Image (cartoon, grey):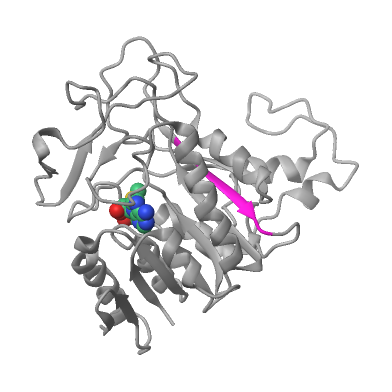
Amino acid sequence: MAQVIFDDALSALKRLPECAADMCVTSPPYYNLRDYGIECQVGTEKTPEEYIKRLVDIFHEVKRVLKDDGTLWIVIADSYAGSGKGRNKSGKTGLLNNKKQVSNTGSHTGTLIKTTATNCKSKDLIGIPWLLALSLRDDGWYLRSDIIWDKSGNVFPESVKDRCTKSHEYIFMLAKSQKYYYDAEAIKEPVAESSLKRAQYGWHGKGVNNSGNYAGLPQTNKMGTRFVKPSGRNKRDVWHINTHSYSKGHYAAYPPELIRPCIKAGSRARGIVLDPFLGSGTTALVALQEGRDYIGIELQKEYEPLIYERIGNAVEQADSKQYVCVSGKGDKKI
Ligand SMILES: C[S@@+](CC[C@H](N)C(=O)[O-])C[C@H]1O[C@@H](n2cnc3c(N)ncnc32)[C@H](O)[C@@H]1O
């Protein structure tokens, strides 16, 4: 059964049974980026250590809810200490003028807050993604992959002149157990023409001659055909995906194409995909498109119409199953 629960992630997860989901893909609120003035919100902790501890506790509960062969995929970005262009004069976190910022699409985008970090000087990169990944590993997760989300195709320009423009985020893939479900075939990539040629001629060559032909000796071992298959190659860990603005009401939605491979590799058909920070419902949308079910958790009830709109459209295209959304007021069929 697919469902959306509007509640704090930790409280909601505690009510879910063990082994209820096949995999989890999510993007937690980034550290000290925005303050919505909502009790229980993640991201406004006073220090990175408190933020990481909070996430480790939430993902500990995710581990209980995942099947033993389940995986967790976390999209996470870094922050710089001392940034926070919209900070208030006292330097405290909180809403500017007691008002939420509202985007041009009418959604609440929260208030930019000052990024504080013990052990960091102003301007230091805090290293949030790796602090989280290593803490999760300490908590028993198997840390299996640090995928780079390369956003350089259309990343928002920064005004900095003393470092490179940040154009990547991390996707960490972690597993509950040493052996886990991972469908490499489902996310194979096309093989480059040059690799196919190289495989054909072997690796002993001296490179390509002026006429573009391989000048090497014939292949004497099976390396080429063993590792390079015309049907596709194992997916690489740098993913070039443009950001997109799902501008209808959530400032931080991730692109569906970013998490599609995670869902395809991490769950079987009709498996259940969990997202404890559902936001605008991208995870639920892609799960439905890929023939999976989902359990989504979101603190902000104001996203409910947005989520229903996205899921509703996907349900129309999917089969005739009933999807039930659990809100504070009880079950709602859509
Ligand atoms: C980065 S956004 C997720 C965006 C989502 N991936 C999408 O595509 O729309 C993080 C979400 O976590 C929610 N959130 C913050 N604190 C939470 C909490 N304690 N429990 C559940 N959700 C929370 C925020 O309201 C926000 O919608």
Residue located at (41% from left, 78% from top): 2
Q: Is residue 264 left or right of residue 138?
A: left
> Where is residue 181 shown, x and y percent of the image?
67, 65
State the residue lying farthest toward the top: 162
Q: Is residue 249 left or right of residue 197?
A: left
The magenta span reads 169-176
> Residue 254: in sight, yes or no?
no
Q: Quadrant of the N terminus?
A: bottom left
- Give the quarter of the image for residue 333: bottom left
> Residue 2: in sight, yes or no?
yes
> Where is residue 260 shown, x and y percent of the image?
46, 59
> Where is residue 270 shown, x and y percent of the image?
52, 79
Q: Nearer the viewer, residue 184 or 206?
A: 184
Q: Main secondary structure of the magenta part?
A: strand
> Where is residue 286 shown, x and y percent of the image?
40, 66
- Give the quarter of the image for residue 329: bottom left
Q: Nearer the viewer, residue 199 or 183?
A: 183
Q: Is residue 10 left or right of residue 98?
A: right
- Give the quarter of the image for residue 99: top left
Q: Is residue 237 located in the magenta-colored stretch of the structure? A: no
Q: Is residue 172 located in the magenta-colored stretch of the structure? A: yes
Q: Quadrant of the C terminus?
A: bottom left
Vertical side of 239 occupied by 210: above or below:
above
Residue located at (18% from left, 25% from top): 88
Residue located at (25% from left, 28% from top): 92
